[in-house]
Amino acid sequence: DPTQCAQTVENVKYIMKHRPSLPIFGICLGNQILALAAGATTYKMKFGNRGMNQPVVDLRTQRCYITSQNHGFAVDQRTLPESWVPLMVNANDGTNEGIIHSSKPWFSVQFHPEACGGPTDTDFLFDYFLQFIAEPTASPVTT
């Protein structure tokens, strides 16, 4: 339950408030932590998404990636604040698989882009994060 990580959520909120140009890239539980810090809510899934074969659709391109996941909670994307948008969605059950801020260098994904659904399928997410580090006002991951 990501709400049990209250101190971590507070730390992320602090960074978002006091260092708004600092890039943030949440992975797996980091997606839920970032959503909670932004003011959204999470919920317990009936079964969760587990395994090396979870299809995730990038909402910007409609491209589908096969991802590695192991989680039992999801972000309720209906509760995302105005400046946040869904980035990716699970093709099987429609649950949120990522969020992004519309103007800050903050984004996250629910899956493990460093794992191997395909050896380099989602490497571009790390490229975006490195670009945010080099130029925090850049916004290549918006939907």
Image (cartoon, helix red, strand yellow):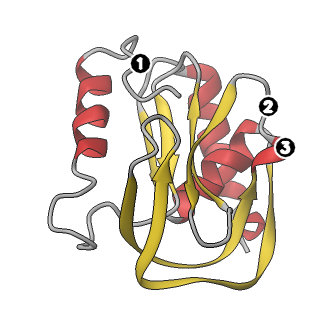
- Give the SS element for disc 3: helix
Q: Nearer the viewer, residue 36 or 81?
A: 81
Per the image, the residue denoted by label 3 is 79
Q: Which residue is mark 2?
A: 81
- Could you tell me if the residues under marks 3 and 2 are in contact, i.e. CB atoms within 8 Å? no
The three-letter amino acid code for the residue at tag 3 is Thr
Q: Identify which residue, 88 or 26, lies in the foreground.
A: 88
- Residue 114, position as x, y percentages in the image: 26, 64
Is residue 67 shown above or below 124? Answer: below
Classed neighbour count for the residue bearing mark 3: other residues with Cα under 10 Å, few (<14), some (14–19), many (≥20): some
In this rendering, position of residue 50 left or right of residue 40: left
The percent coordinates of residue 74 (x first, y second) are: 70, 65
Report how far apart the C-alphas of labels 2 and 1 lie in the structure: 18 Å
The residue that appears at 37% across and 17% down in the rendered structure is 136
Whole-percent x, y for residue 82 in the image: 78, 24
User: For this view, does 72 lie left or right of residue 87?
Assistant: right
